[in-house]
Image (cartoon, rainbow, N blue to C red):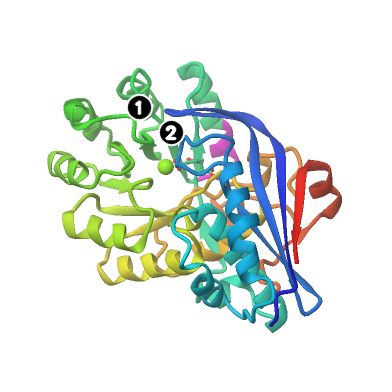
Amino acid sequence: MRIDQVEIRYIQLPLVHPFETSFGREDARHTIIVAVRGDGLTGWGEAATSEGPWYEYETVETAWHALRDFLGPRLVGQQVSTAWDAARLMAPIRGHNLAKMGIEAAICDLQGQAEDKSVSSLLGGTRETVAVGVSIGVQGSVPDLIDRIDGFLEEGYGRVKIKIRPGWDVDVVRQVRKRYPDLSLMVDANSAYSLDDSELLSALDEFDLLMIEQPLAHDDLVDHAELQRRLRTPICLDESVPSLAAARAALALGSGRIINIKPGRVGGLTVARDIHDLCQAEEVPVWCGGMLETGVGRAHNVALASLSGFTLPGDISASARYFHEDIVEPAFTANPDGTVTVPSGPGMGVSVVLDRVEAATRRRYLIK
Ligand code: OSB
Ligand code: MG
C-alpha cells in the first residue's frame, strides 16, 4: 500500500517504580510512538528510547532526528506492504536501530490490519502464550529486593532477573539464592565489569544461575569469549549484539551461549527474526529482552517471542509492572502460569487509547 503519513510523538510516561541499573536510574520513560497511515488504516510502533545514551547510544532526541529527517521521509509516498519492504527502504541509513524498529513495527501492525493477520502470524510465530520473567533493578537493600521478588512470584512470574553492578553482586545473589533455592534466577550486569573481574564473576558459578547477561563491555566479543571459557554459567549477550553480523561473530567466537534478542537494539523485527533463525540453526537458545516498552512496543515483543526458537522466558512483564496506566487496551497481564498471552487479533492485537497518548505527548510531528 501507499504510505500517506508518518506521525511521531515523543511521549513521557512515569514508571510505577524507578528502574536502576549499572548505568543509572530512570523514573519515567521517554519514548517515541510512531503512527504510519495508509489505505485509511493506522499502524503503530514504538522506538523504545530513553532520555540518555546509557544502555546504547541512541536517545529520544537522536531517534526523533532520525525519524523526522531521514526514516519518515523515505517511507512517505512509497509502496510498502511488509516490514521487509520498510527495512529495504531504511537500509541506506546506518545505525539508529531503535528508530528503525519504530517504523518496522508500525508497518507490521498496518500489514496485519490490512490482511487480517496478527503480527505474530506474519512473523511466523507458533505459540499462543509466551513464558515471561521479570527484570528487577538495583534496590536500596536486600530485604527490599526480597520483598519485590516475593510480590512478583505471587503474581506468577517463573523467572527472576536481578541487575548487578560492583558493590551489588555476589553477596546479594548469595542471599537471594539462599532464600529461594529453586528459583529460576539470572543476573544482568549491563557491561559493568571487565575481564579483570573474572574471579568475582566466577564466584557466581556456585549459585546455579540460568545465565549471566552482558557482564563485559557493550562492544566486546573477544573478552566475553575468554570469560565464557572461565565460567561454568552460560553468558548471555545483550548490548554486544546490535546486528546479525555481530550475532554471527559472537557464535563463531563463543562469546556466550545464549542471546537476548531485542528488536529495537537490532534495528527491527526482520533482523530480529534473522538472528532468531541463525541461533535456531546453531541450537543456541534465545529469549526476547525488553526496554520497559509501553503496550505498543510490548505487543510487538510478545509477537516476536511467539517464534519457536524463543525457548527461554522473556523480559516481558505485565503493563502494571511498569505503568499506572498503559497506552493500550487491553493492557498486558501475566497469567498465573508465568506466561503472557499472544494477542491474536489483526495487527498488534491491542488498541491504542488516543486520549492517553495525547495526555503523555510532549511533542508531535507529521511527515506527509
Ligand atoms: O539490559 O535488559 C536490559 C531495560 C532497559 C534497558 C536495558 C535493559 C532493561 C531491562 C528491563 O532489563 C526489561 C524489561 O522489563 O523491559
Ligand atoms: Mg540486558
Q: Quadrant of the N terminus?
A: bottom right
Q: Which mark is residue 173?
A: 1
Q: Is residue 102 above or below residue 123?
A: above
State the separation of the CA atoms marked 1 and 2: 8 Å
Can you give x and y, in whole percent of width and height, for residue 203 in the image?
A: 21, 28
Q: Is residue 166 above or below residue 153?
A: above
Of helix, strand and loop, which one carries label 2? strand
**Nearer to us in this view, 73 or 24:** 73
Q: Which mark is residue 162?
A: 2
Q: Is residue 153 left or right of residue 183?
A: right
For badge 2, the amino acid type reads Ile
Q: Is residue 321 left or right of residue 240?
A: right
User: Which image quarter: residue 210?
Assistant: top left
Can you give x and y, in whole percent of width and height, for residue 345 in the image?
A: 70, 72
**Magenta stretch holds residue 156:** yes
Q: Is residue 64 above or below residue 270?
A: above
Residue at 56% over, 37% down: 152
Query: Which span of residues is magenta-colored?
Result: 151-157
**Magenta stretch holds residue 246:** no
Whether the residue carrying mark 2 lies under 8 Å from ligand 1 is answered with no
Residue 328 in view of the camera = no
